[in-house]
């Protein structure tokens, strides 16, 4: 039977023994766990009549090759509000047309990524309320228009491996309420300007590992787009200033743009300025590219909150950040920066997090953080710093600074300025230094040394 769990929120029900499926599967709360059990066929389910809001059937990482009719047994006995069936990472090449017939009108998330499907299964037409469908890692060669029409009335999220498509799938337009679209391995160097027509409710678009040369102008029709990921694309035209789309009207709804792993050597500022393609942009990621000079950004005006520039070839913090007074987070890990001067961060009064992990930095000017009144989190792990920078004196009432892996030498002389802070702030972890003193034997943390300074240093 099903019963209310006393130690979890009242909307959540648990599966009591006997579990509706035999070993090696197990039941945990509202999850049926069959992960990695080396099973080759869908197990037999025998559900007891019940009602609950969520049920998760997890059959990932097995060797199942097909789903027969009524594959989930008498699941109609369970009047759940939402059902997740996770069949990722199997070897499924065949799904019977009646495989999901017993599911009825239940809201469904169906995960079929990393299998051997070559077409959309007709069984999807029996899912009257299919919300999410994941099909990455399959060789889908075409999208059946009849199936797309049926699922289009309910589907809000589609993840599709497009690597085997011969032409752009016009039937995507049948997904009239889709809000999330993830496309991998698009084989085309460009797509029609009308490719996304009909998908007017798309809020999140992700394109990975494609042959596209630029971000397609087709996105200009997505009037509700908020998040755009265009990442891991190896054939980007590095000589074109049209890497970002040219739309007749600004895409004012886009607030997040993620452009990692595109081999970019330069980035043109037009797209992210107040008057550019994405005037409402708040998050920009250019991490994991080949950027070594962002001087073109210097004269631009930005309104970014989050800027990610990790794993490029930057030797300096871009001066463009001076024009980003709203910036909250700046990530610069994995670059070749050696110094932070006293002017680069001067305009960042709202900066809360600065991350520079795995950079050869060995000098931070004493006034580098003099206007960083809001800075609370400072990541300087694995740098060449040998002392805590005096710039931390300008940080606020509380902060967390991590120097783990950096060769910090703790002496009364080079850390004397820290005596100006109340020891109680370090004892209570209101101010926190992470990392160890390289000159201490036995090992002593920086925090321990600072707390002990009054007694040790007199």
Image (cartoon, grey):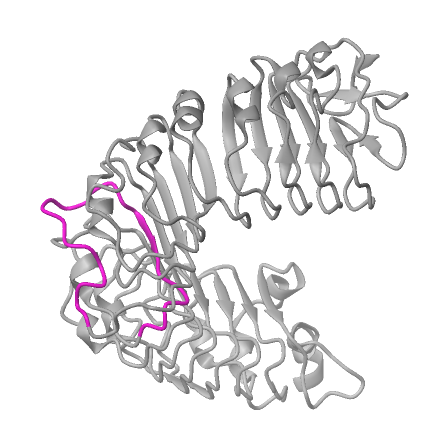
- The answer to whether one can see residue 126 in this image is yes
Which sits in the foreground, 175 or 403?
Answer: 175
Q: Position of residue 411 (x, y in %)?
A: 63, 89
Which sits in the foreground, 47 or 302?
Answer: 47
Q: Is residue 231 magenta?
A: no
Instruction: Name the residue at 82% across, 18% down.
Output: 46
Left or right: residue 389 versus residue 323 is: right
Instruction: Name the residue at 35% across, 66% down.
Output: 286
Q: Position of residue 302 (x, y in %)?
A: 21, 59
Image: 385 above or below 174: below
Image: 449 above or below 229: below
Image: 326 above or below 360: above
Instruction: Name the residue at 63% across, 86% down.
Output: 410
- The answer to whether one can see residue 458 in this image is no
Q: Quadrant of the C terminus?
A: bottom right
Left or right: residue 129 versus residue 210 is: right
Looking at the rendering, which quadrant does residue 197 occupy?
Answer: top left
Looking at the rendering, which quadrant does residue 260 occupy?
Answer: bottom left
Which sits in the foreground, 287 or 42?
Answer: 42
Instruction: Name the residue at 32% across, 45% down.
Output: 168
Which region shows up in magenta? 240-264
Q: Quadrant of the N terminus?
A: top right
Q: Position of residue 288 (x, y in %)?
A: 43, 70
Left or right: residue 220 versus residue 173 is: left
């Amino acid at each position: 039977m099903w019963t209310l769990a006393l130690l979890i929120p009242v909307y959540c029900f648990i599966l009591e023994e006997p579990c509706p499926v035999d070993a090696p599967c197990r039941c945990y709360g509202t999850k049926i766990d069959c992960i990695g059990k080396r099973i080759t066929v869908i197990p037999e389910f025998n559900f007891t009549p019940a009602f609950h809001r969520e049920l998760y059937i997890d059959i990932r990482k097995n060797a199942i090759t097909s789903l027969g009719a009524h594959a989930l047994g008498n699941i109609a006995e369970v009047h759940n509000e939402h059902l997740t069936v996770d069949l990722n990472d199997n070897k499924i090449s065949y799904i019977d047309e009646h495989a999901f017939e017993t599911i009825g009108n239940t809201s469904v998330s169906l995960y079929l990524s990393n299998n051997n499907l070559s077409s959309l299964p007709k069984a999807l037409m029996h899912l009257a309320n299919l919300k999410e469908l994941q099909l990455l890692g399959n060789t889908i060669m075409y999208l059946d228009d009849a199936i797309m029409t049926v699922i289009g009335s309910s589907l809000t999220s589609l993840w599709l491996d497009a690597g085997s498509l011969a032409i752009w799938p016009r039937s995507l337009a049948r997904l009239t309420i889709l809000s999330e679209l993830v496309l991998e391995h698009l084989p085309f160097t460009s797509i029609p300007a009308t490719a996304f027509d009909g998908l007017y409710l798309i809020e999140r678009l992700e394109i990975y590992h494609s042959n596209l040369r630029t971000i397609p102008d087709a996105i200009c029709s997505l009037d509700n787009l908020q998040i755009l990921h265009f990442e891991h694309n190896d054939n980007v035209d590095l000589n074109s200033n049209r890497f970002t789309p040219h739309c007749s009207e600004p895409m004012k709804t886009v607030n997040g743009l993620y452009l990692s792993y595109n081999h970019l050597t330069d980035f043109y500022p037009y797209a992210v300025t107040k008057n550019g393609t994405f005037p409402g942009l708040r998050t920009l990621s250019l991490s994991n590219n080949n950027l070594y000079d962002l001087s073109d950004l210097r004269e631009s005006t930005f309104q970014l909150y989050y800027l990610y520039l990790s794993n490029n070839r930057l030797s300096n913090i871009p001066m463009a950040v001076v024009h980003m007074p709203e910036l909250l987070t700046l990530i610069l890990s994995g670059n070749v920066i050696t110094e932070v001067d006293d002017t680069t961060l001067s305009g960042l009064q709202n900066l809360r997090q600065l991350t520079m992990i795995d950079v050869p930095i060995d000098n931070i000017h004493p006034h580098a953080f003099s206007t960083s009144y809001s800075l609370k989190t400072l990541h300087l792990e694995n740098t060449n710093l040998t002392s805590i920078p005096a710039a931390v004196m300008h940080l606020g009432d509380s902060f967390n600074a991590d120097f783990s892996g950096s060769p910090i030498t703790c002496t009364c002389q080079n850390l004397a300025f820290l005596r100006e802070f109340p020891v109680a702030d370090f004892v209570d972890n209101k101010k926190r230094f992470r990392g160890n003193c390289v000159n201490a034997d036995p090992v002593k943390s920086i925090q321990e040394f600072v707390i002990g300074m009054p007694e040790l240093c007199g």
